[in-house]
Image (cartoon, rainbow, N blue to C red):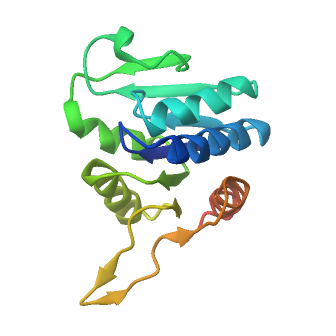
């Protein structure tokens, strides 16, 4: 069983929420477990999509109260670690899909790449080194493509 991280902002536009929901739905349809930060925005939308498709959702929460989880998280894991929980999310998955996002998402992308995990992005950060794009994030144009890329890379153990 593969665990796929979905990362992104705690707030997002309706358009981004639709994309995240489609990502979650596709993860569930493909039989993988969705792991996220368990709060709102992209995380909530992805969990909603996964739950509606019969999938399993895990939320790794920054605080100490499982009630902080969005209503679509089935397994809330409290950490009491604040933003440091981002590392736990990344250590718990075989691939990451970044949808939109802010600096917290960027930190998760960095931890994933440092760990050698595949990172797929939709409307998210583009990385460069000395002004040159480094191509570390695989860019997807749709939710099904993102999930295909993430699962294929995770199964092959590549980034």
Q: Is residue 5 left or right of residue 22?
A: left
Q: Is residue 142 above or below residue 9?
A: below
Q: Residue at x 43, y 54 (%)?
A: 100
Q: Is residue 33 left or right of residue 69?
A: right
Residue 96: percent from the left, percent from the top?
A: 51, 53
Q: Residue 69 falls in which quadrant of the image?
A: top left
Q: Residue at x 25, y 20 (%)?
A: 63
Q: Is residue 49 above or below residue 123?
A: above
Task: State the count of labels.
Answer: 0
Residue 61: percent from the left, percent from the top?
A: 34, 25
- Quadrant of the image for the N terminus? top right
Q: Is residue 103 above or below residue 71?
A: below
Residue 25: percent from the left, percent from the top?
A: 70, 37
- Quadrant of the image for the C terminus? bottom right
Q: Residue 138 falls in which quadrant of the image?
A: bottom right
Kindly tell me whether residue 125 is visible in this rendering.
yes
Q: Decide which of 144, 11 is in the foreground and name it.
A: 11
């Amino acid at each position: 069983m593969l665990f796929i991280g979905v990362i992104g902002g705690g707030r997002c536009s309706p358009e981004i929420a639709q994309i995240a929901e489609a990502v979650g739905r596709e993860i569930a349809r493909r039989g993988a477990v969705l792991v996220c930060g368990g709060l709102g925005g992209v995380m909530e939308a992805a969990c909603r999509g996964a739950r509606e498709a019969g999938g399993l959702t895990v939320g790794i929460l920054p605080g100490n109260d499982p009630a902080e989880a969005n209503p679509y998280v089935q397994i809330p894991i409290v950490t009491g670690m604040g933003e440091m929980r981002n590392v736990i999310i990344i250590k718990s998955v075989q691939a990451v899909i970044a949808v939109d996002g802010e600096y917290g998402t960027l930190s998760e992308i960095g931890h994933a790449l440092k760990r050698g995990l595949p990172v797929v992005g939709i409307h998210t950060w583009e990385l460069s080194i000395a002004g040159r794009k480094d191509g570390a994030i695989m860019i997807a144009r749709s939710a099904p493509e993102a999930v295909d890329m993430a699962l294929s890379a995770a199964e092959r153990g590549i980034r």
